[in-house]
Image (spheres, helix red, strand yellow):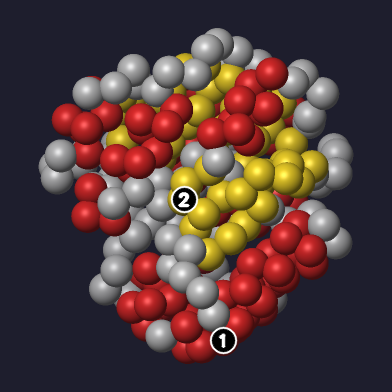
Protein backbone atom coordinates (compact mmCIF):
# COMPACT_ATOMS: atom_id res chain seq x y z
CA UNK A 1 0.00 0.00 0.00
CA UNK A 2 1.06 3.57 -0.70
CA UNK A 3 0.72 6.11 2.10
CA UNK A 4 0.45 9.70 0.87
CA UNK A 5 1.41 12.07 3.68
CA UNK A 6 0.46 15.73 3.19
CA UNK A 7 1.80 18.14 5.85
CA UNK A 8 -0.77 20.94 6.06
CA UNK A 9 -1.39 24.24 7.79
CA UNK A 10 -3.87 26.76 6.36
CA UNK A 11 -3.41 25.77 2.73
CA UNK A 12 -6.64 27.05 1.18
CA UNK A 13 -5.36 30.41 -0.05
CA UNK A 14 -2.54 28.77 -2.02
CA UNK A 15 -5.05 26.88 -4.17
CA UNK A 16 -3.17 23.62 -4.64
CA UNK A 17 -4.86 21.41 -2.05
CA UNK A 18 -8.20 21.70 -3.84
CA UNK A 19 -6.53 20.16 -6.91
CA UNK A 20 -4.34 17.67 -5.05
CA UNK A 21 -7.02 15.90 -3.05
CA UNK A 22 -9.45 15.05 -5.90
CA UNK A 23 -6.54 13.82 -8.04
CA UNK A 24 -5.51 11.21 -5.47
CA UNK A 25 -8.74 10.47 -3.61
CA UNK A 26 -9.75 7.39 -5.61
CA UNK A 27 -6.42 5.68 -6.17
CA UNK A 28 -6.51 1.94 -5.31
CA UNK A 29 -4.39 0.52 -2.51
CA UNK A 30 -3.63 4.00 -1.23
CA UNK A 31 -4.23 5.92 1.98
CA UNK A 32 -4.17 9.71 2.28
CA UNK A 33 -3.05 11.27 5.55
CA UNK A 34 -3.20 15.03 6.11
CA UNK A 35 -1.01 15.82 9.11
CA UNK A 36 -2.34 19.18 10.24
CA UNK A 37 -1.05 21.76 12.71
CA UNK A 38 -4.38 23.36 13.58
CA UNK A 39 -5.68 24.87 10.35
CA UNK A 40 -8.64 27.23 10.70
CA UNK A 41 -9.14 28.33 7.09
CA UNK A 42 -11.18 25.45 5.67
CA UNK A 43 -8.26 23.08 5.08
CA UNK A 44 -9.75 20.47 7.41
CA UNK A 45 -13.22 20.73 5.86
CA UNK A 46 -11.74 20.28 2.39
CA UNK A 47 -9.77 17.26 3.56
CA UNK A 48 -12.86 15.70 5.12
CA UNK A 49 -14.74 16.01 1.81
CA UNK A 50 -12.56 13.35 0.17
CA UNK A 51 -11.25 9.94 1.16
CA UNK A 52 -8.55 11.23 3.53
CA UNK A 53 -7.61 10.91 7.19
CA UNK A 54 -6.80 13.97 9.30
CA UNK A 55 -4.07 13.44 11.84
CA UNK A 56 -3.71 16.48 14.13
CA UNK A 57 -0.34 17.41 15.57
CA UNK A 58 0.92 20.09 17.94
CA UNK A 59 4.10 20.49 15.92
CA UNK A 60 4.48 23.82 14.14
CA UNK A 61 7.09 22.63 11.60
CA UNK A 62 6.83 20.62 8.43
CA UNK A 63 9.49 18.26 9.78
CA UNK A 64 7.29 17.56 12.78
CA UNK A 65 4.32 16.85 10.54
CA UNK A 66 6.39 14.47 8.44
CA UNK A 67 7.54 12.63 11.57
CA UNK A 68 3.94 12.33 12.75
CA UNK A 69 2.87 11.02 9.36
CA UNK A 70 5.47 8.26 9.42
CA UNK A 71 4.25 7.20 12.86
CA UNK A 72 0.67 6.58 11.67
CA UNK A 73 1.19 5.51 8.03
CA UNK A 74 0.41 1.90 7.18
CA UNK A 75 1.87 1.67 3.68
CA UNK A 76 5.02 -0.08 2.53
CA UNK A 77 5.86 3.05 0.49
CA UNK A 78 5.54 6.60 1.85
CA UNK A 79 5.04 9.67 -0.35
CA UNK A 80 5.55 13.08 1.25
CA UNK A 81 3.32 15.32 -0.85
CA UNK A 82 4.17 19.00 -0.52
CA UNK A 83 0.85 20.92 -0.31
CA UNK A 84 1.94 23.42 -2.97
CA UNK A 85 2.85 21.07 -5.81
CA UNK A 86 0.74 18.97 -8.17
CA UNK A 87 2.14 15.57 -9.13
CA UNK A 88 0.92 13.89 -12.29
CA UNK A 89 -1.59 11.20 -11.42
CA UNK A 90 0.25 8.70 -13.65
CA UNK A 91 3.36 9.19 -11.54
CA UNK A 92 1.58 8.38 -8.31
CA UNK A 93 -0.11 5.39 -9.95
CA UNK A 94 3.32 4.09 -11.03
CA UNK A 95 4.68 4.60 -7.54
CA UNK A 96 1.75 2.73 -6.02
CA UNK A 97 2.32 -0.25 -8.32
CA UNK A 98 6.06 -0.77 -7.81
CA UNK A 99 7.98 -2.32 -4.95
CA UNK A 100 11.44 -1.79 -6.45
CA UNK A 101 12.15 1.86 -5.57
CA UNK A 102 14.03 2.65 -2.37
CA UNK A 103 13.60 6.45 -2.39
CA UNK A 104 13.44 9.40 -4.77
CA UNK A 105 11.13 12.00 -6.27
CA UNK A 106 9.46 13.39 -9.39
CA UNK A 107 10.55 15.88 -12.05
CA UNK A 108 10.54 19.46 -10.74
CA UNK A 109 8.81 22.01 -12.97
CA UNK A 110 7.70 25.54 -12.10
CA UNK A 111 4.32 26.53 -13.46
CA UNK A 112 5.21 29.97 -14.91
CA UNK A 113 7.34 30.42 -18.05
CA UNK A 114 10.69 32.19 -18.03
CA UNK A 115 14.39 31.38 -18.39
CA UNK A 116 15.16 31.66 -14.67
CA UNK A 117 12.35 29.30 -13.68
CA UNK A 118 13.43 26.82 -16.36
CA UNK A 119 17.03 27.01 -15.15
CA UNK A 120 16.04 26.40 -11.53
CA UNK A 121 14.04 23.33 -12.49
CA UNK A 122 16.86 22.07 -14.73
CA UNK A 123 19.35 22.51 -11.88
CA UNK A 124 16.98 20.87 -9.41
CA UNK A 125 16.56 17.80 -11.58
CA UNK A 126 19.99 17.37 -13.15
CA UNK A 127 22.45 18.72 -10.61
CA UNK A 128 20.98 18.74 -7.13
CA UNK A 129 18.97 15.54 -7.59
CA UNK A 130 21.03 13.41 -10.00
CA UNK A 131 24.53 14.55 -9.02
CA UNK A 132 24.30 15.63 -5.38
CA UNK A 133 21.43 13.28 -4.43
CA UNK A 134 19.63 16.04 -2.53
CA UNK A 135 15.87 15.88 -3.09
CA UNK A 136 13.69 18.78 -2.00
CA UNK A 137 10.16 18.21 -0.80
CA UNK A 138 8.74 19.98 -3.86
CA UNK A 139 9.89 16.99 -5.92
CA UNK A 140 7.52 14.84 -3.85
CA UNK A 141 9.84 12.65 -1.79
CA UNK A 142 8.96 8.96 -1.65
CA UNK A 143 10.71 6.35 0.45
CA UNK A 144 10.41 2.65 1.16
CA UNK A 145 8.95 1.94 4.59
CA UNK A 146 11.91 -0.15 5.72
CA UNK A 147 14.34 2.65 4.87
CA UNK A 148 12.08 5.28 6.43
CA UNK A 149 12.24 3.46 9.73
CA UNK A 150 16.04 3.78 9.63
CA UNK A 151 16.14 7.55 9.09
CA UNK A 152 13.07 8.88 10.92
CA UNK A 153 12.40 10.84 13.01
CA UNK A 154 14.26 13.76 11.45
CA UNK A 155 15.23 16.83 13.49
CA UNK A 156 12.32 19.17 14.16
CA UNK A 157 13.80 22.07 12.20
CA UNK A 158 11.76 24.82 10.47
CA UNK A 159 13.83 24.73 7.26
CA UNK A 160 16.13 22.36 5.33
CA UNK A 161 14.25 19.37 6.70
CA UNK A 162 14.28 17.86 3.20
CA UNK A 163 18.04 18.37 2.88
CA UNK A 164 18.60 16.70 6.25
CA UNK A 165 16.36 13.82 5.20
CA UNK A 166 18.19 13.45 1.86
CA UNK A 167 21.58 13.38 3.58
CA UNK A 168 20.36 10.51 5.73
CA UNK A 169 18.72 8.62 2.87
CA UNK A 170 21.65 8.90 0.45
CA UNK A 171 23.83 7.04 2.94
CA UNK A 172 21.72 3.97 2.18
CA UNK A 173 20.77 4.30 -1.51
CA UNK A 174 20.82 6.52 -4.59
CA UNK A 175 17.55 8.39 -5.23
CA UNK A 176 15.41 7.50 -8.24
CA UNK A 177 13.96 10.29 -10.40
CA UNK A 178 10.59 9.21 -11.78
CA UNK A 179 9.86 10.76 -15.17
CA UNK A 180 6.56 12.33 -14.15
CA UNK A 181 6.15 16.02 -13.43
CA UNK A 182 5.61 17.75 -10.12
CA UNK A 183 4.27 21.22 -10.92
CA UNK A 184 5.63 23.61 -8.30
CA UNK A 185 4.12 26.82 -6.92
CA UNK A 186 6.37 29.87 -7.47
CA UNK A 187 4.77 31.82 -4.62
CA UNK A 188 8.05 32.67 -2.86
CA UNK A 189 9.70 33.78 -6.08
CA UNK A 190 6.76 35.88 -7.23
CA UNK A 191 6.37 37.53 -3.83
CA UNK A 192 10.02 38.53 -3.32
CA UNK A 193 11.04 38.66 -6.95
CA UNK A 194 12.57 35.70 -8.82
CA UNK A 195 16.21 36.85 -8.79
CA UNK A 196 16.18 38.04 -5.18
CA UNK A 197 14.67 34.74 -4.00
CA UNK A 198 17.03 32.68 -6.14
CA UNK A 199 20.16 34.47 -4.88
CA UNK A 200 18.87 34.41 -1.30
CA UNK A 201 18.36 30.66 -1.51
CA UNK A 202 21.98 30.16 -2.54
CA UNK A 203 23.17 32.21 0.44
CA UNK A 204 20.96 30.22 2.80
CA UNK A 205 22.29 26.90 1.47
CA UNK A 206 25.86 28.12 1.95
CA UNK A 207 25.16 29.26 5.51
CA UNK A 208 23.45 25.96 6.29
CA UNK A 209 26.47 24.03 5.00
CA UNK A 210 28.66 26.18 7.27
CA UNK A 211 26.62 25.17 10.30
CA UNK A 212 24.33 28.15 10.86
CA UNK A 213 21.24 27.09 12.82
CA UNK A 214 18.14 26.48 10.66
CA UNK A 215 16.02 28.51 13.11
CA UNK A 216 18.07 31.61 12.28
CA UNK A 217 17.99 30.97 8.55
CA UNK A 218 14.23 30.48 8.60
CA UNK A 219 13.61 34.03 9.79
CA UNK A 220 14.78 35.40 6.44
CA UNK A 221 13.39 32.56 4.35
CA UNK A 222 9.89 32.93 5.70
CA UNK A 223 9.71 36.69 6.11
CA UNK A 224 6.03 37.60 6.13
CA UNK A 225 4.94 34.60 4.04
CA UNK A 226 4.84 32.00 6.85
CA UNK A 227 4.57 29.19 4.30
CA UNK A 228 6.37 26.62 6.44
CA UNK A 229 3.83 26.92 9.23
On the image, the x and y values in percent for residue 106 come to 66, 46
At 26% from the left and 73% from the top, the residue drawn is 224
Q: Quadrant of residue 119?
A: bottom right
Q: Name the residue tied to disc 1.
A: 199
State the SS at label 1: helix
Q: Which mark is residue 38?
A: none
Establish if 76 lies above or below 199: above
Q: Quadrant of residue 204?
A: bottom right
Quadrant where the C terminus is found in the figure: bottom left
Horizontally, residue 33 falls left or right of residue 4, namely left
State the SS at label 2: strand
Q: Is residue 127 visible?
A: yes
At 47% from the left and 46% from the top, the residue drawn is 86
Q: Which mark is residue 85?
A: 2
Q: CA distance from mark 2 to mark 1?
A: 22 Å
On the image, the x and y values in percent for residue 191 come to 33, 78
Upstream in the sequence, badge 2 or badge 1?
2
At 47% from the left and 83% from the top, the residue drawn is 194
Establish if 223 lies above or below 65: below
Quadrant where the N terminus is found in the figure: top right
On the image, the x and y values in percent for residue 82 come to 47, 46
At 49% from the left and 19% from the top, the residue drawn is 27
Q: Is residue 165 visible?
A: no
Horizontally, residue 165 falls left or right of residue 20, namely right
Amino acid sequence: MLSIIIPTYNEIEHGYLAEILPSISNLPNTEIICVDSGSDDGTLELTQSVNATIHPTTSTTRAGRMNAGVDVAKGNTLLFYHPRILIQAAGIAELAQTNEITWGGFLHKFTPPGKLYKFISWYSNNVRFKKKHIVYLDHGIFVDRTLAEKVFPIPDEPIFEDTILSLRLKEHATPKLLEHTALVSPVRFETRGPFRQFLGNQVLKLLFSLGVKPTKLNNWYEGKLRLNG
